[in-house]
Amino acid sequence: GALHEGHISLIKTALKYTDTVVVSIFVNPTQFNNPEDLKKYPRTLVQDCKKLAEANVSILFAPSVEDIYPEPDTRVFDFGTLDALGEGPRRPGHFNGVAQVITKLFDTVKPKYAFFGEKDYQQLAIVKYFTRQLDYPVQIIACPIVREDDGLAMSSRNTLLTPEQRKVAPLIYQALLNAAALAKEEKITPEELIKITINKINNSPQLEVEYVEIVDSATLQPVSLWDEAEEIQMWTAVFAGKTRLIDNIKLK
């Protein structure tokens, strides 16, 4: 819900692969570990429909909660160690809820391809994992993060920011860019780089870092030395007031 240009970019990519694009809009209650967060999550179905019509979407699938969960979904998924860091410990049950709803969507729509944004980097890795584990004949396509002109990663939650919070929110990406530049030099350890990045974001009184972590891009395990992994990702979650923003960047 609350579609933005990031979502539209997924549709544009999908249209390069196939003529028939199905978009699902469903605010999934099982992936919210905080009832308040579920309640305030933006829902703008009428505006969303207009955007989808303009984007040449073939089918909108906008089920009710009762459609998806006629009875409680008691399935529990195992993601190995992919949910050990990042959102995993901070949002208990979140990824299990994601897997519940995505498997139901796959079973209903039976897609050949599914398109996910890299802003939810950990989610993307977990979706790829359980798609393989459960033998879904679906190719998962990763799509790059789409940003506002000032660098803020596009998100439905951005609509919840106050003008003051919106003004300073781009500092998150600036701190990540700074981290990427420092990581290239490899003169400081990942642990030191995390501290620098946290301090840079927390310099704004409007922002409060929940976490910054540096992980192996493939295993999502923590990295303490630069030569421990072929590819390395930094990810973060930051509160602007009560609104939680996530972002990430490739360091190596």
Image (cartoon, grey):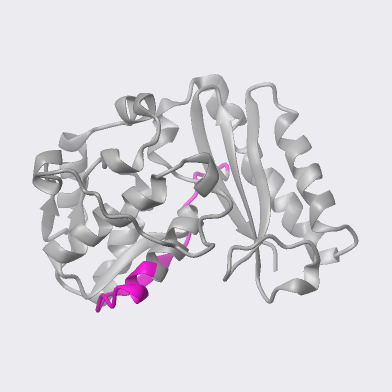
Check residue 25 for magenta coloring.
no
The quadrant in which residue 28 appears is top left
Q: Quadrant of the C terminus?
A: bottom right
Check residue 139 for magenta coloring.
yes
Residue located at (51% from left, 56% from top): 83
The quadrant in which residue 236 appears is top right
Report the number of discs: 0
Q: Quadrant of the N terminus?
A: top left
90 and 24: which is toward the camera: 90
Residue located at (69% from left, 63% from top): 251
Q: Which residues are magenta?
A: 130-150
Q: Is residue 151 left or right of residue 48?
A: right
Q: Is residue 77 left or right of residue 111?
A: right
- At which x and y percent is residue 109? 13, 64
Residue located at (39% from left, 35% from top): 33
- At which x and y percent is residue 214? 69, 56
169 and 56: which is toward the camera: 169
- At which x and y percent is residue 16? 28, 74
Q: Say above or below: 186 vs 120.
A: below
Residue located at (30% from left, 25% from top): 39
